[in-house]
Image: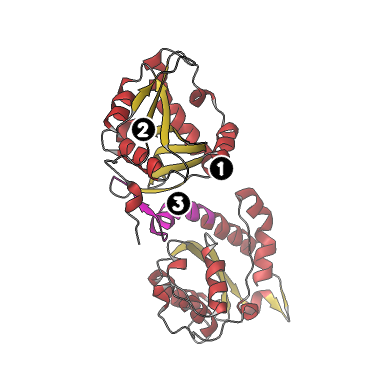
Amino acid sequence: MAEWFTDTVTPQAADLGADLVPVSLAELGLPFLDEPEPPAKGIYRQEHTRRWSDLVRSASGFVIVTPEYNYGMPATLKNALDFLGREWAWKPVGFVSCGNTSAGTRAVQHAKQVVTTLRMVPIGATVALRLGEVATGDAVTPSASHGAAAASVLEELVRAAHALRPMRERSAPGAIAGPVPGSYLRRLTAGDAAEVTVLQRCCWVEEARANQTLDLAALDESPHQVREWLQAWTAWGLWRDGRLLGMVRTLKDGEDWHIGRLAVVPDMRARGIGASLLSHAEACAEAGTARSVLTTGSGSEHNLRLYQRQGYHRLPDGRHPGTVRLTKPLGSPASHRIAGAAMS
């Protein structure tokens, strides 16, 4: 059954950008739960538990292929779910069931009671296979309608995984609470290039007007160029419900800690986000840096006021007309610091 599902949806998975990783509980070889601590604590002493934890943590969603026994799911499936706790949270799960009278649907209903307790989110699309209709010996030959149902399961699973991503990130160990309710800070990656490009073009239009020039890199960069600097710089983004509210990037150059691309969406300004991102960037300065340095347009009065309130002073710099360079000794008191508020 699992091989049929995987083979059926593999072409669609490529179109959806999803990686399929088949896992057999038989090959996984989990014993009945043998950890001395409750799984909710996440303290694992057994090597097989740690392997299972790594595998589940790395996935964004699941399709469970299960038979039905006596109105319920097999003990091996229940055991595999019970082994872990937070690794399952805020991930969608779909079901492919098989059985006789009910085509395995009662096993799915049983499993849903467990997965929702683990904060998983069952999707609506399912595949239910009646053994008498699809199985001949060891071979299974589901109908075209079953194949269409399998495609629906994968599509809905991928869409739900994207929608639940903010919940997974916000509840991940080490996530950093942001300055506005429901927001969290995380490192930006090359995969965030599209959102960063939109934020830059939104914010730097005002900079262009304030400085009477369109010659601003942040306005012209393509997503490919943004992806390149995201790999070269260390950048952080403030997110809420899947929306990028603000960002900042840093780079070490000798004793200087360069801070740039500080941006906050227009409708979320005057809430301390910019000051918090700036202070976080300063707090993350690498060893061996003596001062933080940043640049802004000479006409960007709002930026200049913010930087001066944060303790920055202008540097004499005639190399770039129309811009102002500012510096601040590292270790100076910061009015905000996001890094101190990690969420459990």
Residue with the mark numbered 1: 190
Name the element at disc 2.
strand
Which is in the foreground here, disc 1 or disc 2?
2
Amino acid beneath label 2: Lys
130 part of magenta stretch: no
182, above or below 174, in the image: above
Magenta stretch in the rendered image: 158-180
Task: Indicate the secondary structure of the residue bearing disc 3.
Answer: helix
Closer to the N terminus: mark 1 or mark 2?
1
Q: Residue at x 48, y 55 (%)?
A: 160
Position of residue 286 measured from the top left corner of the image (x, y, whole percent): 47, 45
Q: Give the crowd class for mark 1: few <14, some 14-19, many >=20 residues within 10 Å.
A: some
Residue at screen point 41% across, 35% down: 291
Q: Which residue is mark 2?
A: 328
| Labels 1 & 2 near each other (Cβ < 8 A) | no
Which residue lies under the disc numbered 3? 163
Q: Is 3 drawn above or below residue 327 in the view shown?
A: below
| Residue 188 coordinates in the image, percent (x, y) | 49, 44
User: Disc 2 and disc 3: Cα gap in Å?
Assistant: 40 Å
Labels 3 and 1 touching (C-beta < 8 A): no
102 to the left or right of 274 = right
Identify the residue at image location x=40%, y=69%.
116
Q: Is residue 86 left or right of residue 192?
A: left
